[in-house]
Image: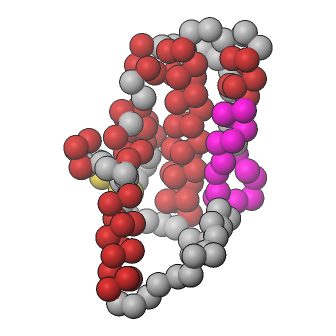
């Protein structure tokens, strides 16, 4: 987050710990910050960005390390567009007792190209969904 680099994470924002699950949601922190901005309690955009980034990175690092320990993995790979976030990169490496592989930022791209490639190969294989296909935001990954 470019704006966060010039700000101070001084605005207290909630963390979405979602007890009993490894899932995370950032809607609460987004809403909390929006209400503070709309209420005129936050006017410095850089501080707002830094505070939001701090809240999100805190949850991502804590949950990632906890899951990695629980699953007894040998290393963590930080990937995708989020992996280009400098604070996340630094915190995960610093706070993880498990080795973290962090590619150069130029290699940390959004997954859109990979999703498009997957769609292309599914189409070529004749696997086509109907136009009434819907989004399932709570779909389990495993």
What residue do we see at 54% from left, 14% from top? Answer: 45
Residue 38 placement (x, y as % from top left): 73, 17
What residue do we see at 68% from left, 25% from top? Answer: 33
Q: How many marks?
A: 0
The N terminus lies in quadrant: top left
The C terminus lies in quadrant: bottom right
Q: Is residue 100 visible?
A: no
Residue 128 placement (x, y as % from top left): 47, 84
Q: Nearer the viewer, residue 74 or 62?
A: 62
The residue furthest bottom is 126
What residue do we see at 46% from left, 21% from top? Answer: 4
Q: Is residue 109 visible?
A: yes
Rendered view: 51 above or below 45: below
Query: Seen in the image, is 25 located left or right of residue 100?
Result: right
Instruction: Answer whether residue 32 is magenta in the image.
Output: no
Residue 122 placement (x, y as % from top left): 38, 82
Magenta range is 17-31
Q: Nearer the viewer, residue 124 or 104?
A: 124
Q: What sort of colour scheme is used for the picture?
A: secondary structure
Q: Nearer the viewer, residue 104 or 62?
A: 104
Q: Nearer the viewer, residue 109 or 58?
A: 109
Main SS, magenta residues: loop
Rendered view: 65 above or below 92: below
Residue 123 placement (x, y as % from top left): 37, 82
Image quarter of residue 54: top right
Instruction: Answer whether residue 30 is magenta in the image.
Output: yes
Rendered view: 18 above or below 86: below
Query: Seen in the image, is 64 located left or right of residue 124?
Result: right
Rendered view: 35 above or below 90: above
What residue do we see at 68% from left, 34% from top? Answer: 29
């Amino acid at each position: 987050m470019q704006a966060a680099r010039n700000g101070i994470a001084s605005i207290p924002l909630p963390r979405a710990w979602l007890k009993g699950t490894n899932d995370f949601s950032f809607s609460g922190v987004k809403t909390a910050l929006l209400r503070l901005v709309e209420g005129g309690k936050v006017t410095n955009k850089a501080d707002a960005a830094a505070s939001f980034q701090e809240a999100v990175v805190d949850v991502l690092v804590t949950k990632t390390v906890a899951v990695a320990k629980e699953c007894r993995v040998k290393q963590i790979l930080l990937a995708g567009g989020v992996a280009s976030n400098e604070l996340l990169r630094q915190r995960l490496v610093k706070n993880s007792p498990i080795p973290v592989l962090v590619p150069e930022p130029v290699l940390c791209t959004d997954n859109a190209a990979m999703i498009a490639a997957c769609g292309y190969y599914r189409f070529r294989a004749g696997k086509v969904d109907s136009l009434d296909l819907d989004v399932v935001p709570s779909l389990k990954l495993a």
